[in-house]
Amino acid sequence: MPSLLAAATLTLCGTAPHAVADEMASRQWYLDAMQAQQMWTVSRGEGITVAVVDTGVDSSISELKGKTVQGDDVSNKPLGADVDKVGHGTNMATLIAGAGDGGGIQGLAPGARILPVRTVGAGLADASDPIMARAIRYGVDHGARVINISMGAPGDISQSPQTEAAVRHALAKGALIFAASGNDRDKGNLPNYPAAIPGVVSVGAIDSTSTVTKWSNSASNVALAAPGENIPGRCTKSEGFCDGGGTSQATALASASAALIWSKHPDWTNNQVLRVLLETAGKPTTGKIPSPYIGYGIVRPRKVLLDGEGDPGPADVNPLLAAGESASPKPLPSSGSTSSATPNRRSAAEPGSAKGGGTALSWGVGIGIVAIAGVAVTTLMARRRRQ
């Protein structure tokens, strides 16, 4: 199986003008769409630790000062949890819990704490299965209730036994694991791991019109979707902020959504938090649920926090596993050869819809994106260009 770490593509941003506070607020379109300001009057994610399993987290940046707890680098040649040479892990952490200071990134769950778990493999020194398994175990064993894995790679589930065991361990200890479904639907659309492991919440990406992006992987194991297009983050080759996108960003926002709900309902189990996330997600207007593109729908924590919706149900029943989640997820054929963007956004279960949801996916407010001139996106690997 290709290395889960070496094959994971991390979206890097090129040069862009320095963003002032009001500009950044307009660029973080999804916060208004999700009614973040209103939700923060009820919950900011306090008391919840989110493990960011990634390239490290630079805790010295203004948005993350005082937001992190002591983490670890679980690779065989560790440099430290706070070393992030790529910037990907730092950007995921800010999307989850950033303070927004000085015109920086405002996290969706600014009261949450970040536990950085660096998982940068060193060539043949690190096998992907053991390092990912160590990362998940470290996160849950050091107090993380939510584990965010904005990385992954295509592969055979039979070749990830240690990671599967770590997932079972984390679920048994009461944690939730969110992982990126992948960004290669138009380039192969293979199942991505660890997102495809039973019990992991696989997250797809939508844009500002609530439409699934053409590159967000579709498969039978996709559970939820979240905003993942035109998401600002710190540039990696210059000062300032640049726009990026991928199921990585969508995963971070799904993790933050869980933190908000769990903070408000600390007595709920992982299964109950997940159940209300699935129940209150924005559903497609047509087709079957779950959809192979957006799963049970678009995350809408406001429905739980502001509207009081969602039945937590039984504490000891995982709603994904109870629903018979397949151990061998079945992807849809790649539509990369199609020149039109519309067919790429259709679900096989919704052949008449150009969107993965239509008006029922609306979050109740107008959403738009301010075009940022001169934003360049650099990718490490074209194969997984957006994650």
Image (tube, grey):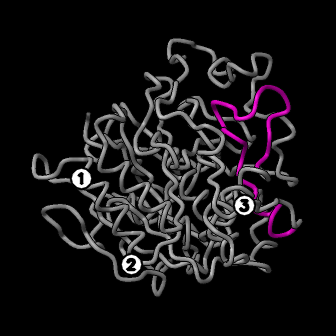
Q: What kind of element bears circle 1?
A: helix
Q: Crowdedness of circle 1 by 10 Å Cα count: few (<14), some, many (20+)?
A: some
Instruction: Return the x and y of residue 94 as percentages of the image width and height.
Output: 51, 69
**Quadrant in which the C terminus is drawn:** top left
Q: Nearer the viewer, mark 3 or mark 2?
A: 3
Q: Which residue is mark 1?
A: 130
Instruction: Return the x and y of residue 24 as percentages of the image width and height.
Output: 62, 65
Amino acid type shown at disc 1: Pro
Amino acid type shown at disc 2: Ser
User: Most prominent secondary structure in the magenta stretch?
Assistant: loop
Instruction: Return the x and y of residue 174 as percentages of the image width and height.
Output: 53, 67
**Residue at 43% across / 65% down in the picture?**
52
Q: Which residue is mark 3?
A: 314
**Could you say which is closer to the camera, residue 100 or residue 261?**
261
**Residue at 62% across / 53% down in the picture?**
318
**Disc assigned to residue 59:** 2
Q: Which portion, as a residue range, is magenta?
A: 281-306
Q: CA distance from mark 3 to mark 2?
A: 38 Å
**Could you say which is closer to the camera, residue 114 or residue 314?**
314
